[in-house]
């Protein structure tokens, strides 16, 4: 299993798997604000899971899924039926039953990985959009803007550590946004270079895929689900379970002490450690 690089370049490559939790929608079809209404998430989160050995993780998750599908205990569970195209196709924390989730978490905890995420509070994003509309009547909010700027925040300090960064994004809808994802990473590179006056010459390989095709994306989904449960419902037991795999959570809009938000690390979790 390869080592995960954190500091200086070591000539190796790293593998990131990127997904989202919540939605980036602020307005309805007629321009009515949806934030704070039923069905609209409170937060929008982008997470990147750095996996040391993606092939080993994929193998273990595939083996687990096959064994669960063959287990008579699950034979009548709706999400396990092939026709539903849910757990039978890929693990997805929102759809998986609790017994399945527990087994997936067991596998994730055995693997070397590090989770990075940026959390945006949509009430704050909405306030910014409204304020900007007052200054610039031509400005129009686009959900993809929130996605792309959040990706740039996630990777701001991530692209310089090794010679090659392989970044796999979970596909969003049917449109091909590969170029947009590449641009977001270039923005992250530029911000790092401007801040530290240091050239970043790491190569970045961008792939857009689905969790069924690229299995480590399923692990990213689970990490994001745990974080989302904490922010949306105040439920921290899943996040506590995975916290050993968390490197950095940037809560951009938690600005009680700092204008740049709050950073949570392994030694500084957002919950009260037991």
Image: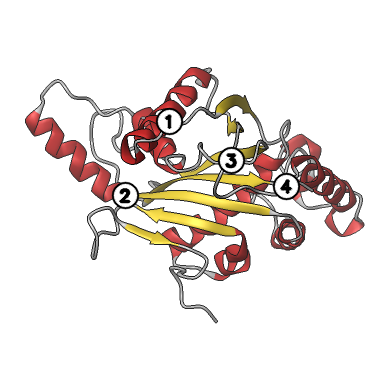
**Secondary structure state at the residue bearing disc 4:** helix
Of the two numbered discs 4 and 2 on the same chain, state the one appearing first in sequence: 2
Name the residue: 55% across, 40% down.
19
State the image coordinates of residue 97 (x, y, percent, origin top left). Answer: 70, 57
Of the two numbered discs 4 and 1 on the same chain, state the one appearing first in sequence: 4
State the image coordinates of residue 31 (x, y, percent, origin top left). Answer: 23, 31
Quarter in which the C terminus is drawn: bottom right
114 vs 169, nearest the viewer: 114
**Secondary structure state at the residue bearing disc 1:** loop
Q: CA distance from mark 4 to mark 2?
A: 28 Å
Q: CA distance from mark 4 to mark 1?
A: 48 Å
Q: CA distance from mark 1 to mark 2?
A: 45 Å
**Which residue appears farthest toward the left when viewing the image?**
135
Question: Residue 199's mark?
Answer: 1
Name the residue: 48% across, 56% down.
248
Q: For residue 209, which quarter of the picture?
A: top right
* Mark 3 lies on residue: 9
Name the residue: 83% across, 55% down.
74
Q: CA distance from mark 1 to mark 3?
A: 13 Å
Q: How many marks?
A: 4
Work out whether 257 lies above or below 157.
below
* Mark 2 lies on residue: 37
From the viewer's perspective, is the residue at label 1 or at label 2 nearer?
1
From the viewer's perspective, is the residue at label 2 or at label 3 nearer?
3
Of the two numbered discs 2 and 3 on the same chain, state the one appearing first in sequence: 3
* Mark 4 lies on residue: 79
State the image coordinates of residue 98 (x, y, percent, origin top left). Answer: 69, 62
119 vs 206, nearest the viewer: 206
């Amino acid at each position: 299993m390869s080592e995960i690089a954190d500091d200086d370049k070591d000539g190796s490559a790293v593998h990131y798997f990127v997904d989202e939790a919540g939605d980036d929608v602020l307005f309805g079809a007629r321009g009515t604000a949806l934030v704070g209404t039923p069905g609209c998430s409170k937060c929008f989160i982008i997470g990147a899971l750095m996996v040391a050995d993606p092939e080993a993780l994929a193998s273990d998750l595939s083996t687990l899924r096959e064994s669960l599908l063959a287990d008579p205990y699950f034979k009548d569970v709706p999400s396990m039926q092939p026709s539903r195209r849910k757990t039978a196709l890929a693990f997805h924390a929102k759809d998986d039953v609790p017994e399945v989730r527990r087994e997936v978490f067991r596998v994730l905890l055995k693997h070397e990985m590090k989770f990075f995420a940026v959390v945006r509070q949509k009430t704050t994003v909405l306030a910014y959009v409204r304020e900007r509309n007052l200054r610039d009547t031509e400005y129009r909010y686009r959900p993809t803007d929130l996605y792309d700027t959040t990706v740039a925040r996630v990777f701001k300090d991530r692209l310089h550590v090794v010679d090659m960064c392989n970044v796999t994004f979970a596909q969003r809808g049917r449109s091909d946004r590969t170029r947009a994802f590449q641009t977001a990473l270039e923005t992250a590179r530029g911000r790092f270079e401007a801040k530290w006056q240091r050239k970043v010459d790491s190569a970045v390989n961008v792939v857009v895929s689905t969790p069924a095709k690229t299995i480590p994306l399923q692990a990213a989904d689970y990490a994001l689900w745990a974080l989302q449960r904490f922010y949306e419902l105040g439920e921290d037991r899943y996040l506590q379970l995975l916290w050993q795999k968390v490197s950095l959570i940037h809560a951009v809009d938690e600005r009680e002490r700092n204008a740049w938000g709050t950073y949570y690390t392994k030694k500084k979790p957002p919950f009260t450690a037991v």
